[in-house]
Amino acid sequence: MRTALCPGSFDPVTLGHLDIIERSSRHFDEVIVAVIRNPQKTQSLFSLEDRQQMLKEATQHLSNIRIEFFKGLLVDFARDHGVDAIVKGLRAVSDFDQELQMAQMNQRLSGIDTFFLSTSPQHSFLSSSLVREVARFGGDVSGMVPGNVNDRLVETFQNGRSTAAEGEV
């Protein structure tokens, strides 16, 4: 059985993320979607548990997807879960420099290869941070995120609160 790992902060999950997850699910027997806490990013909008739940709802139509979350090195998580490949989406050339360095480091540390999928053109401009920013100011992001995520964004910003744990990064 071939297992792929699609890591990300998914804060929130976008249709671009789902594009990569769905396409990965066609090429691997199992895909683990790993929700990570990224200390290099700003305060999270949603808690890890909320992100995990939104991903489960958004991927329920895919039978070979498992949602997990973790802290620490990606390659340690990958080894512990028998992962054969890491799958990353590339939106633009600007993503490639950083992703290539991470892929090479991960391969050096673990022997696990990274597969790059180009994001479908209709999703290439999407990022979680951009979606959060538009939603924060009342913009319509319904065509950029799954319906369940859009509902959570509207609820969160209409109520003027974030569901992330205090101090979570």
Image (tube, rainbow, N blue to C red):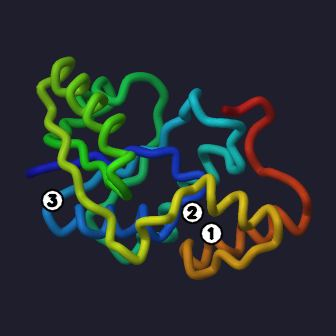
Q: In which quarter of the image is residue 142?
A: bottom right
The reply to whether the C-beta atoms of the residues labelled 1 and 3 are less than 8 Å apart is no
Q: Percent x, y for residue 97? A: 32, 37
Is disc 1 placed on a helix, strand or loop? helix
Mark closer to the observer (1, 2): 1
Mark 1 and mark 3: span between their CA atoms?
A: 26 Å
**Closest to the observer, 161 or 48:** 161
Mark 2 and mark 3: span between their CA atoms?
A: 22 Å
Inspect the image, locate mark 3, and give the three-letter code of the amino acid beneath it.
Asp
The reply to whether the C-beta atoms of the residues labelled 1 and 2 are less than 8 Å apart is yes
Q: Percent x, y for residue 34? A: 41, 45
Inspect the image, locate mark 1, and give the three-letter code of the amino acid beneath it.
Val
Q: In which quarter of the image is residue 40?
A: top right
Q: In this view, does 43 lie above or below 132?
A: above
Mark 1 and mark 2: span between their CA atoms?
A: 6 Å
Mark 3 or mark 2, which is nearer the start of the sequence? 3
Using the image, tell me which numbered label, if any, was put on residue 54.
Answer: 2
* Residue located beneath label 3 in the image: 29
Is disc 3 placed on a helix, strand or loop? loop
Disc 2: CA contacts within 10 A as few (<14), some (14-19) or many (>=20): many
Q: In this view, does 114 lie above or below 142?
A: above
**Closest to the observer, 31 or 145:** 145
Q: Residue at x 16, y 20 (%)?
A: 108
